[in-house]
Amino acid sequence: MSGIWWLVWPAEVALAAAVLALLARRLWRDVKALGREVEAAGTHLDRLASAGATTGPPRHVPGATGDPEVVAKAREVRERIRAQRDGARAARLARAVARWRRARLVR
């Protein structure tokens, strides 16, 4: 019975060495692939940097820069929406206060 253990242990050691070799091989391939990706990213960044150095279209500045009539209409719409929201908020508050008064929580 003790003779079989002399066969099992070397097989386990060989199997562990094979697994270690496979893991090392996979790690090496992943490192090489990462290097290729980093190199490609560097190439893309170089192209972006060189494209950014050239004069391109002007940057968009947010804000009202359109036709004065359109801007005036937009302001009117914004004020109407604000008034509707304020009215809805006041109505909600009035309903809440009425509930609180019915429950005698406030005077």
Image (tube, grey):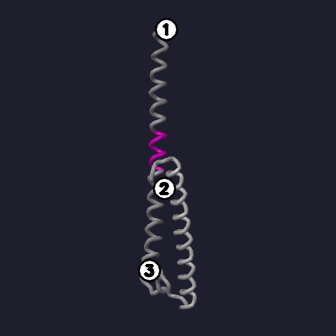
**Highlighted range, magenta:** 21-29
User: Counting other residues with Cα less than 10 Å from the Cα at mark 3, is it few (<14), some (14-19), or many (20 or more)?
Assistant: few
> Relative to the observer, which residue lies in front, 40 or 83?
83
User: From this viewpoint, which residue is outermost toward the bottom?
Assistant: 68
Measured Cα–Cα span from mark 1 to mark 2: 49 Å
Judge whether 70 appears above or below 32 on screen.
Answer: below
Judge whether 73 appears above or below 100 on screen.
Answer: below
Q: Is residue 2 left or right of residue 91?
A: left
Q: Which residue is mark 1?
A: 1
Could you tell me residue 46's position as x and y percent? 43, 74
Judge whether 65 appears above or below 31 on screen.
Answer: below
User: From this viewpoint, which residue is outermost toward the front?
Assistant: 107
Q: Which residue is mark 3?
A: 52
Q: Which residue is mark 2?
A: 33
Are the residues flagged by discs 1 and 2 in contact, CB closer than 8 Å?
A: no
Q: Amino acid at mark 2?
A: Ala
Can you tell which of label 3 and label 1 is closer to the viewer?
Answer: 3
Could you tell me residue 98's position as x and y percent? 53, 55
